[in-house]
Image (cartoon, grey):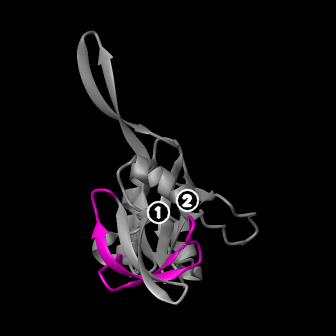
């Protein structure tokens, strides 16, 4: 199964506590192979008050966290029963599993925080096979020729009309094949 991103509802103001508890539970229950990353969507905000400039983190979606996981019964149970979690978004309830976020939705939120949906260090390397999921080359497969981390771009070698062609795509436009 593929790891995907899900939105988890928490008590408002408890997002960081829930993130901490969920990461601890994933480790203590040996679920690191199913529950990968827990992210509290937030941005730095500069505030000037009485002539003093302060930086503070502002929650983009108060009461919600993002969890990258493989939706197994065990992982679903661990997340749902973490103290402070009130449920998944995209689930009809009654034991139904939730719908994952679309890659473009995750990219929008994570890129505003300076994070990438794909962990370049762990998931991508030169020569790896990927599928293009957006843009003019949507649906094509290719192998990675180079990775431009600062600009979030990847050069791929794709088969275009029977000839190997080099194309550049954004990190948000691919997924692992």
Residue 11 coordinates in the image, percent (x, y): 54, 47
User: Label 2: which residue?
Assistant: 104
Q: Residues within 10 Å of mark 1 (few under 14, many from 20)?
A: many
Residue 93 coordinates in the image, percent (x, y): 74, 64
> Furthest residue to the left?
52
Q: To which quarter of the image does residue 137 belong?
A: bottom right
At 76% from the left and 68% from the top, the residue drawn is 94
Q: Is residue 121 left or right of residue 45?
A: left
Does any portion of residue 83 appear in the rendered image?
no
Which numbered disc flags the more N-terminal residue, 1 or 2? Answer: 2
Does any portion of residue 77 appear in the rendered image?
yes
Residue toward you, 141 or 36:
141
Q: Residues within 10 Å of mark 2 (few under 14, many from 20)?
A: some
Secondary element under disc 1, as helix, strand or loop, is helix
Secondary element under disc 2, as helix, strand or loop, is helix
User: Label 1: which residue?
Assistant: 172
Q: Is residue 57 left or right of residue 7?
A: left
Q: CA distance from mark 1 to mark 2?
A: 7 Å
Residue 120 coordinates in the image, percent (x, y): 32, 70
Instruction: Tell me where the magenta segment starts and ends, as one range.
Output: 123-151
């Amino acid at each position: 199964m593929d790891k995907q991103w899900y939105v988890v509802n928490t008590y408002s103001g408890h997002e960081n506590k829930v993130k901490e508890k969920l990461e601890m539970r994933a480790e203590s229950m040996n679920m690191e192979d199913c529950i990968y990353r827990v992210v509290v969507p937030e941005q730095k905000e500069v505030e000037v008050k009485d002539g003093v400039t302060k930086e503070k983190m502002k929650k983009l979606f108060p009461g919600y966290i993002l969890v990258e996981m493989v939706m197994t019964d065990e992982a679903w149970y661990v997340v749902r029963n973490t103290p402070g979690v009130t449920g998944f978004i995209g689930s009809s309830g009654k034991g139904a599993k939730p719908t994952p976020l679309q890659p473009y939705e995750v990219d929008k939120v994570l890129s505003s925080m300076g994070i990438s949906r794909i962990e370049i260090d762990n998931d991508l390397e030169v020569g790896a096979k990927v599928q293009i999921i957006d843009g003019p080359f949507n649906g094509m497969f290719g192998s990675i020729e180079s990775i431009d981390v600062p600009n979030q771009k990847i050069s791929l070698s794709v088969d275009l009309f029977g000839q190997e062609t080099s194309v550049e795509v954004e990190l948000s436009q691919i997924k692992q094949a």
